[in-house]
Image (tube, rainbow, N blue to C red):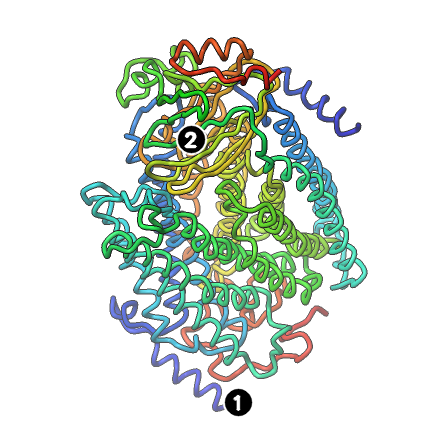
Amino acid sequence: MIRKSLTGLIGLVWAGGASADWALNMPQGVTDLSQETYDLHMMGFWVCTVIGVLVFGVMIFSLIKHRKTSGVAPAKFSHSTSAEVTWTIIPVIILVAMCIPAAKTMIKLEDTRNPDISIVVTGYQWRWHYAYQDQDLAFYSSLARPSLEARQLGSTIDPYSVDNYLLEVDRPMVVPVGAKVRVLLTSNDVIHAWWVPELALKKDAIPGMVNEIWFRAEHTGTVRGQCAELCGKDHGYMPIVVEVVEPDEFDKWLTANGGTPKAVAAAAK
Amino acid sequence: MTTAVADAAHHVEHGPAKGFSRWLFTTNHKDIGTMYLIFSLTMFFVGGTMALIVRSELAQPGLQFVHPEFFNQMTTMHALVMIFGAIMPAFVGLANWMVPLQIGAPDMALPRMNNWSFWILPVAFCMLLSTLFMPGGAPAGGWTMYPPLVLQTGDSFPFLIFSIHLMGLSSIMGAINIIVTIVNMRTPQMVLIRMPLFAWAWLITAYLLLAVMPVLAGAVTMLLTDQFFGTSFFLAAGGGDPVMYQHIFWFFGHPEVYIMILPAFGIVSEIIPTFSRKPLFGHDSMVYALAAIAFLSFIVWAHHMFTVGMPLSGQMFFMFATMMISVPTGVKIFNWASTMWRGAMTFETPMLFALAFVFLFTIGGFSGLMLALVPADIQYHDSYFVVAHFHYVLVPGSLFALMGAAYYWLPKWTGHMYNETAGKVHFWLSAIFVNVLFFPMHFLGLAGMPRRIPDYSTQFADFNMVATIGAFGFGLSQLIFVYVLLTCKKGPPATAEVWDHPKGLEWTVPSPAPYHTFAEPPKVDRTVAFPKDYD
């Protein structure tokens, strides 16, 4: 409760000057697990903040009071077993307490069973390939043309004039809202990583291996991400765009692009 | 007594040789220490220039100065030069100078190997830096050299591998030398557990080096054979495993980060008691904490790999083991705070750097604790949050400790007091700009900016500009340090003690320390290991 209200307070202070450009914190995202991840992040942040205030407070007090110019004679003590045992044991307890909620979320993150849709995502230098396993649809997704032109060295195009500069693709990945989407990650060449902050998901795409992650988006909308593992010269230019749409809209999108809708919409409902 | 005086006179006659041969053939630990320190300062400016190229490009969205491939060369080379060329050799240089003086030994145990382990380094770095001029440019796959990407490196690939081998060779020889020196050459009454903390930190660091540098050599050799001799250690197409490289690399890499911080802990444990005018709080628990950190550093490597795909039980083990490191690290922070508590502090430049170390390293420790929480790490991993984290522990951590050490022992090395005003200006500018430079990176990472990208979406523009301003401020402030070094000889002569009754054998020899010291083992009190305890 205190944590929530403190978060809110700081949020208010930040919101004062906050355009998106000065974003200070992790997004809370669009899935339950992204919210849990955010909460864990804030828990870590507040534990560190409280310890920091205490430790730095003691040190700053000491720096002000225990200086030679204030005429104090230095004390001679050089150890205290009870103090040392105390500040060894208390941190252990705090750490165990932090691990428990983290472990609960980790278990959920790994549970990729019974997906509504499976999408094989393959990393290429330097674009992504999306293959919808049961919908007969596969396509490449590359950096959108306006960003591509503006990003060149010596380009006269102002990045600010490009919508979603470097975070726009020619063909986004589309998923239905509420469906459990399993993403199977692999790579065709070097290691890439598929990262969408709003989904709180990041996983490496490794040649010769398949990694599994999953998400269930709670709202419709567009979320964006980028490759997060250095993969060569155009590593910075392989964005990810995921559009979360209503199930019937998803079926329309499948049909329009030559795919076959397969009872996904029903499952998502 | 007469013999001792005669001995001293005898040694003065055999002082340093003249000219370049003094430096090329020297087996004197002080000369070799000086060369290490000058070399590392040079590399610090080389690596710093690369960092400024990176930050210049990142000042605004869009590409203004360099192509992405050159940008990647700069980030890769910046890391390799700073880690293997600046931070590690600087600590070895300090060990060369100070370990024999602290333990009352006349020199390092293996002086000729000492000479060799230094002179390998300039060769290794000439080779590494020469790759900038090769077809295909310098290595651009990141300092971690992950396959398969690193195998796409151009002509510079074998030179990269060979220079890493040479650096490893130099480190291993340096580590052997330090271990043998400390174990065999302490003045007879100096009990191991009562040894000064800097020597202790280096003894433990040297064992870490000895354990992991061969692992790195093995990993890069496998890269070499994958590239040129048809093996498939890390190539999936041939039945190999690219992730295995990461396990091997981080088995080296995680102890490596402690190799770069444990000697810093040792330095801070020397400086804070001197300027607090109080003995170090919990000397023995400081030693045990160092040993605990060193042990834990071997069982946490996979926390660098939470996104590669690992069994759940593995993730949980590495999360918990990683969090445990903050226990002994916390003990060290609390002990430093307790050393200051009820002391009589003064704030000369070395103390300022040591204090900034304690505060800012702790911030790096906090972000490290947050990084250990696996679900949160999935967000932080390979983002600017991680860049902020490891720069906080390496720059206001390792580097500030090195700067503090340089100011602390400079009068002992040169026999002159440095310019205190310039030193303080250097400190305050560094301390302010280092935060302007690295603190905004936390926000960038949380907002979703990946690391190692040459250009970014416009939403990240503002904090990147702030960081770049900080980078130039920080980089230019370091020129004040060069000014301090160059003008040091003009300063007033230093006494043997230099500071206000510091403890330790190094303060019993004159300033500057004679070319040969402790030809006869000094006498120390068995229980405190120091010639002068506090009255």
Q: Residues within 10 Å of mark 2 (few under 14, many from 20)?
A: many
Q: Residues within 10 Å of mark 1 (few under 14, many from 20)?
A: few
Q: Position of residue A264 (x, y in %)?
A: 54, 18
Q: Nearer the viewer, residue B263 or A114?
A: A114
Q: Which residue is mark 2?
A: A227
Task: Answer above or below: position of B242 versus B65.
Answer: below
Residue A207: name its quadrant.
top left
For the question of whether residue A42 can be seen, the reply is: yes
Q: Is residue B435 above or below residue B301?
A: above
- Amino acid type, mark 2: Cys
Residue sitting at x 38%, y 46%: B146
Q: Amino acid at mark 1?
A: Met
Q: Are marks 2 and 1 on the same chain?
A: no
Q: Chain of mark 2?
A: A
Do the residues under discs 2 and 1 have CB atoms within 8 angstroms? no
Q: Horizontal placement of B229 versus B500: left or right?
A: left
As measured in the structure, the alpha-carbon distance from the residue carrying label 2 to the one carrying label 1 is 72 Å
Instruction: Name the foreground residue: B409 vs A121.
Output: A121
Q: Position of residue A46 (x, y in %)?
A: 70, 35
Instruction: Write the residue at 60% across / 36% down.
Output: A111
Taking the image as shown, residue B104 lies to the left or right of residue A103, namely left
**Helix, strand or loop at disc 1?**
loop
> Which subunit holds the residue at mark 1?
B
Residue B1, disc: 1
- Please tell me the numbered disc located at residue A46: none
Estimate the x, y position of residue B114 in percent, counting from the top left: 37, 71
- Residue B381 at x, y = what percent? 51, 38
Element at badge 2? strand
* Residue B46 in view: no
Decide: is B379 above or below B225.
above
